[in-house]
Amino acid sequence: MWQGAEQEFATSSQPIGLFKALEDTEVFLFKPETGIPRALLQNGGLCYIHSNLFEVCTPECRDSLELITYDKASEAYSRLASWELEEKTGNRTHVYKTNIASDPKDSTSYTTVGSHENYSVERRIYLANQCMLIPYMILRQIFVGSGGYINGKYLLSPRTIFPKKLLSETSTDYPILSTRDEPHSSEEYIRVHVVNGEGARSEYTNFLKYSITSYVLRAIEQGNLKRAPEIDSPLETNKLISENLRGDWKVKIRNGEEIEVTDYINTYYLSAIEDLFRDNDPNNQDKMALKEFKWTLEKLNLGLIDSLDESIEWVIKKKLTENVGEYAVDEDLEIESARKAILNQYMAVTEPLYDELVEEKRVRTIVSEEAVKRAFYEPPPDSRGFLRVRLALEFKDVLENISWSYMKLKPRIQYEPIEFNDLNSWTREKIEKTLNNIRTLT
């Protein structure tokens, strides 16, 4: 399933400085002459300033393993921007992979920072069955929650303080799922846009998040998921689950029955995924994701939460705050400030703590450094991202704009946008044919 991730990074300075610093490196392939802070990256992704936030998006990836590799490359781009800005100004700017931040305007205690997920699915079937995805989005925080403190209280998912609606086109509603219809592909498909995602450093957490969410969506598409009972008061339930660190999570469904969260996931979502696997031909990556998901659910079901302290983000971060004295935190800080400081160090892609935990084998990894390095420099092979890179390199002198699914040449050559809505089969032959067609216009 084609999928992608967008990360708005919280920063300790004006984000536009990071964008301009990154522009001075060689990673931008194209930036509009209009001065809009938006650029195509050399790996086929995008970097831009959105709502005064420094944002990096992965290119379209064909599966979760590829996606977490490109997500790590996005971290590397933000780290490079910080280094370049420090080289210019002499001041160090930290960049945090998080999903909330302190409000710089002080109008509220916290402001939202986006960590969005995108999945391309068949439009008609998804829209007819979208309701079956909602309970999963509420319940999945027990294994994908990013963890953190809100007003001195540790939560599985700090994001639960924001949503006002389950579904909405309006960003200020902070919905679980955005209903804005921007497929960035042919109209046969729709982009499932998860705007209430979690910014996590843990590769294992992200692997489960992208894998299992894509399997749930595929199970909906193929009819393996036939029923998912509606949760009573879902937004309130979302908060209650997040506040419970004991692991004895329960939810009430609309018929009045109360059910354990792990039982709900096992009965409706895990069983549907297992049916999906039986009906198809899963590869080794899929088999690994399912195996790890079942292992994680079993530990959560048994209340063995501490056994997940090397894999699941909210448990990793909770352990850090419980052992804050082990780390280089100012001894004069009050305990609450010290906990906040250690979590900031973990979330900062510009700090060494996460990498030190990896080296000490206290945090599990999924992808290799070599794979991340390739993802930093190159787009996914045989992909639309690869096409965009070729287009930008060849037509940079006559290019007015390029986006996910179209490009525009400068008006003196061609006014109409040139679309490339297909996501599949961007072989070298198909890419060369597309280039030849555009060459006739120039």
Image: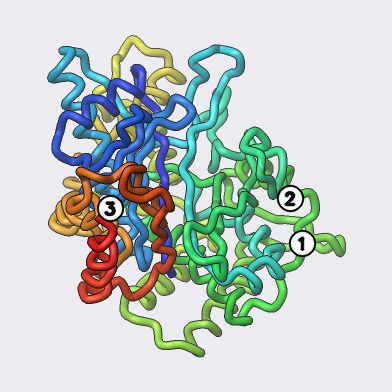
Q: Mark 1 belongs to which amino acid?
A: Glu
**Badge 1 is on which residue?**
230
Q: Is residue 202 visible?
A: no
| Percent x, y of residue 3 | 42, 61
**Badge 2 is on which residue?**
234
Q: Residue furthest front?
A: 412
Q: Is residue 87 left or right of residue 205?
A: left
Mark 1 and mark 3 residues within 8 Å of each other at the beta carbon: no
Q: Mark 3 belongs to which amino acid?
A: Gly
* Residue located at (42% from left, 14% from top): 334
In 3D space, how far apart are the residues under numbered discs 2 and 3 (Cα atoms)?
A: 37 Å
| Percent x, y of residue 171 | 62, 37
Q: Mark 2 belongs to which amino acid?
A: Pro
**Badge 3 is on which residue?**
44
**Of callouts 2 and 3, the N-terminal one:** 3
- Residue 34 vertical position relative to residue 442 in the rendered view, above or below: above
Q: Secondary structure at mark 2?
A: helix
| Percent x, y of residue 231 | 76, 57
